[in-house]
Amino acid sequence: MKVFRGTPVADRLSAPHWERSTYRGPCAVRAEDLATAMDLAAIRFDLRTAGLADTGATPVNPWEVSEYVLWTEHPDDPGLPAGTALTRDEEERCRASTSLRGLVRYLLRRAGAIVRPGRNRT
C-alpha cells in the first residue's frame, strides 16, 4: 500500500466540475495505486454518495482528473485506514486517535450510518 495525497489545483477550483464534489480541500488516500486512490476520492466526495441531488452539470468528478487535482505518492502509513479517502481534518483525527475503532466510528457517524442515542436527525 501507498498513501496518495490529493491537492486541488487552486486556479481550477472555479471549474464547473467542482460542483460535483462535496469537498474541495486536500485529502489523503491509502491505496494500492493512483488509479484506485482517485476512484476512492471520487466516490467519497461525490454528491450522489453524500445523498445530495446531482445537478447533472457535469458528468466528470474532479477527483478523477489530474488537471484538477495534483496527486503525490508517499510511503505507506499503516496508521491510515486502507481504502478510505480522508479530508485533512479526518487525517489529523486519525493520527491523534489511539484507536482505529474510534476513527471508524467517527467516519460512520459522519456518513450518517450511526446515530447517537438521544439525538434526532432531520
Image (spheres, rainbow, N blue to C red):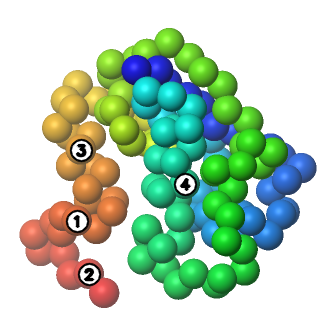
Could you tell which of marks 3 and 4 lies nearer the N-terminus? 4
Rendered residue at 37%/38% (across/down): 83
In 3D space, how far apart are the residues under numbered discs 3 and 4 (Cα atoms)?
Answer: 20 Å
Could you tell which of marks 1 and 3 lies nearer the N-terminus? 3
Rendered residue at 23%/25% (across/down): 98
Could you tell which of marks 2 and 1 lies nearer the N-terminus? 1
Could you tell which of marks 2 and 3 lies nearer the N-terminus? 3
- Judge whether 10 appears above or below 71 on screen: below
Closest to the camera, between mark 2 and mark 4, is 4
Please identify the quadrant where the N terminus is shown. Answer: top left
Residue 15 is situated, as x and y percent measured from the top left of the image, at: 83, 63
Could you tell which of marks 4 and 1 lies nearer the N-terminus? 4
Secondary structure category for the residue under label 2: loop
Q: Which mark is residue 42?
A: 4
Residue 118 is left or right of residue 42, and the answer is left
Q: Classify 10 Å Cα crowding around label 3: few (below 14), some (14-19), many (20 and above).
A: few
Disc 2 marks a residue whose amino acid type is Arg
Residue 87 vs residue 47, the one in the foreground: 47
Rendered residue at 51%/38% (across/down): 37
Reading the image, the residue beneath label 3 is 104
In 3D space, how far apart are the residues under numbered discs 2 and 1 (Cα atoms)?
Answer: 11 Å
In 3D space, how far apart are the residues under numbered discs 1 and 3 (Cα atoms)?
Answer: 11 Å
Residue 68 is situated, as x and y percent measured from the top left of the image, at: 77, 48
Reading the image, the residue beneath label 1 is 113
Please identify the quadrant where the C terminus is shown. Answer: bottom left
Disc 4 marks a residue whose amino acid type is Ala
